[in-house]
Image: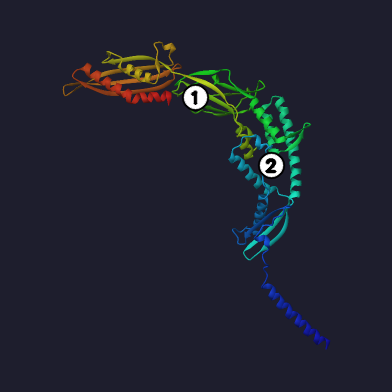
Amino acid sequence: MRFVYFLIFTSLFVFVGCKSKKKTANNDVRPAPAWISTKPADPFYYHGIGVSPKYAYSANYDYKQVAKNNALNDLASEISVKVNASSLLSQVEVNRQFSESFVSNTQVTSTEDLEGFELVDTYETSTHYYVFYRLSKEEHERRKALKRERALAAAADFLSAAEDFRNKRDAYQAYILYIKSMEAIKSFWAEPLEYTYQGNRIFFGNHLISRIISFLNELQIQSPLRQIQVTRGKSIDDEQFEIFVTLQNIRQPSIPVRLSYSGGRLRNPNQKTNVSGAVLVDLGRVTSTAQRERITAAINVEAWTSEATQNQQIIALMNQLRLRPFVLDVVVQSPTFFFISDERAFGRSFSSAVLTDALKMELAKDQFQSTLSADNADFIVSIASDVEDAGFINRMSNVQLSFRIQITDRNNNVIYTRSVKNIRGIQTDEQSAARDAYNKAVRLIQRELYLEIRRSFIE
């Protein structure tokens, strides 16, 4: 009998259990918690809520990890970054774009450095997954303070090493270590950074940037010349234009220098000082039409910083510094030309040097000067021409003029050469026909050939 009662009881239990499971299966989604729609407000915690759809964007899509990352980003956004009035950033005249970029990048980076956060809750539906994290503000500040102290200790060591190299007049290594010090405290640029350094309580960031600025201003860019004289159309010996960098009157090698020239583009505008602490300015051929130009030299802070760090924010910050450039005046002189003329007609000297006079007039328009002494000339212009009889056309004298213009420098290098043949002249007699041919050659010089010559000197 007891066995019968046992079977009945067991059957009822199984029936009720199955019914209960069925009911639970129909209500497997619990009501959405309040934090789904309203983020909690708590003075003691930062909160982060993230959500991700469950459908896959790719084969490797992990919706739980995506939701977690979104929650941590949300949490990090609550940790505001403000530039303190006693911070390093406040001492540098940074533009608004850089300041906003720094704050944004610092917040993004903080998500990678977040520690001590805890999972509060998760919730999911058939289509979405939600996650809720929080971080104790007290714990966050404690961890941050430890990191700040470690960063300041490292930065102080780099700064001390930089000052040692500066005292040893090794500018290159000093700057590299200054930047290493900047890099050590990069996450805390916006903070005042009170720190005891060499027995003194200081705002470390302010002190560091002021030391860097004073160091860069202590570097001197110099030239043995107050101004240089160049000749339009001539190439310049770059050794005449030595510019060097010194620290406490000691020439400094390996310093990046940016050069510019108001009269055109330089062949090598970005250089590093050689073992003698100098850069050699190569102007190439001077083509400026102005009477004065300027060579400007400045420490290439961007290039130098890039040799110490790959961090673009540090490079951008240092590039905000405005250093006074070195300026060297360039006096541009007009070149002088000596003419050798051999203009003929029918093998005899022509009545006047028509082509020579025409070319002199065109040169004078560009302030190029002629000289009667070959020894004083920058360029030698040789003009040779002759007219030949070409018979008659309708009882008119027909002649042909051929000529050659060549320009060389003092070293006998050919700057320009052009030969022209068979310019026809037709008139009632040979002399008039020869004069007609020469007049046509003059117009050719004025309209075409001088433009070619001009380009050889000032274009």
Q: Position of residue 381 (x, y in %)?
A: 38, 17
Residue located at (70% from left, 32% from top): 207
- Amino acid carrying label 1: it is Gly
Tell us which disc is closer to us: 1 or 2: 2
Q: Which residue is mark 1?
A: 284
Q: Position of residue 448 (x, y in %)?
A: 34, 26
- Amino acid carrying label 2: it is Ser
Looking at the image, residue 310 lies above or below residue 449: below
Q: Which of 12/370 is in front?
A: 12
Left or right, 365 with reference to 311: left
Q: Position of residue 163 (x, y in %)?
A: 72, 28
Q: Mark 1 and mark 2: span between their CA atoms? A: 46 Å
Q: Which residue is mark 2?
A: 187
Residue located at (74% from left, 48% from top): 140
Q: Which of 102/341 is in front?
A: 102
Q: Earlier in the sequence, mark 1 or mark 2?
A: 2
- Mark 1 burial class by Cα count in 10 Å: few <14, some 14-19, many 20+: some
Residue furthest left as drawn: 395
Work out which quarter of the rendered image holds the C terminus and state it.
top left
